[in-house]
Amino acid sequence: MIKGILIVNNHGKIRMSRFYTRIDQRKQQQIIRDVFSIVSKRSDAVCNFVELSRTFVSKYRENLEVKQSLIDTDDAKTTDKNETMIRKIKADRELAEFFDSKLIYRHYATLFFIFLVDQSESELGILDLIQVFVEALDQRFENVCELDIVFHFDEVNHILDEIVMGGMVLETNLNQVMNCVYGMKKYEKLSKSVAKKSVTKLKSHV
């Protein structure tokens, strides 16, 4: 399963993020920072996938064990502080489970296309999927650049939805993806033309 998809520029600015697992907004920002800190330091000569479990999970699990031990030693006192600590533990557990995955990415010019997937996904399969996604963007925007993703955010999300939905891969055939994208654009133009014709003009009685 695909857990998250990120598009980040060379300066760490997020251009698109999609998470397919339940995770808090603040934790999403933390994930983006941690992931970018990994990919930005890697040379183009090394492989395009990283086992996050070796990098982050141990750190978060150690924090969980410390917090849990603090609560266990003070079970008699059920204070608001403890309840806050429990909520933090649950949030950190979600984060630890999220980082028990693989990071697969490609670097194109000024953009990193990053997929976070579980252990069941194939690294080479996801690399091909990233290539399909980028080629679809390239066909739609004719040599896609960072500004296209910024100013046509809705179309980028539509293209992604044709490829991945709910963390599952729907389509890998580029021609099929583009047929759906162009079909949607055709219906949009048709609906706009019909809307213009059906506009009721109000006559002035003055």
Image (cartoon, rainbow, N blue to C red):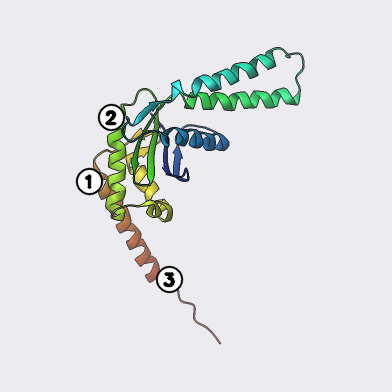
Residue 120: give x, y in percent of width and height.
Answer: 35, 23
Q: Earlier in the sequence, mark 2 or mark 3?
A: 2
Q: Secondary structure at mark 2?
A: helix
Label 1 sits on what residue type?
A: Asn
| Residue for badge 2 | 124
Residue 198: give x, y in percent of width and height.
Answer: 40, 69
| Residue for badge 3 | 199
> Which-is-in-front pick, marks 1 and 3?
1
Task: Please rate how many residues cluster around mark 1, counting C-alpha atoms within 10 Å: few if below 14, some from 14 to 19, many from 20.
Answer: few
Q: Is residue 39 left or right of residue 34?
A: left
> Which label is found at residue 175?
1
Q: Secondary structure at mark 3?
A: loop
Residue at position x 47%, y 42% in the image = 12
Q: Looking at the picture, tell me which residue is in the foreground, 100 or 162.
A: 100
> Is 161 located above or below residue 118 in the figure?
below
In the picture, the quarter occupied by the N terminus is: top left
Query: Spatial distance from mark 2 to mark 3, Cα to Cα?
Result: 52 Å
Label 3 sits on what residue type?
A: Val
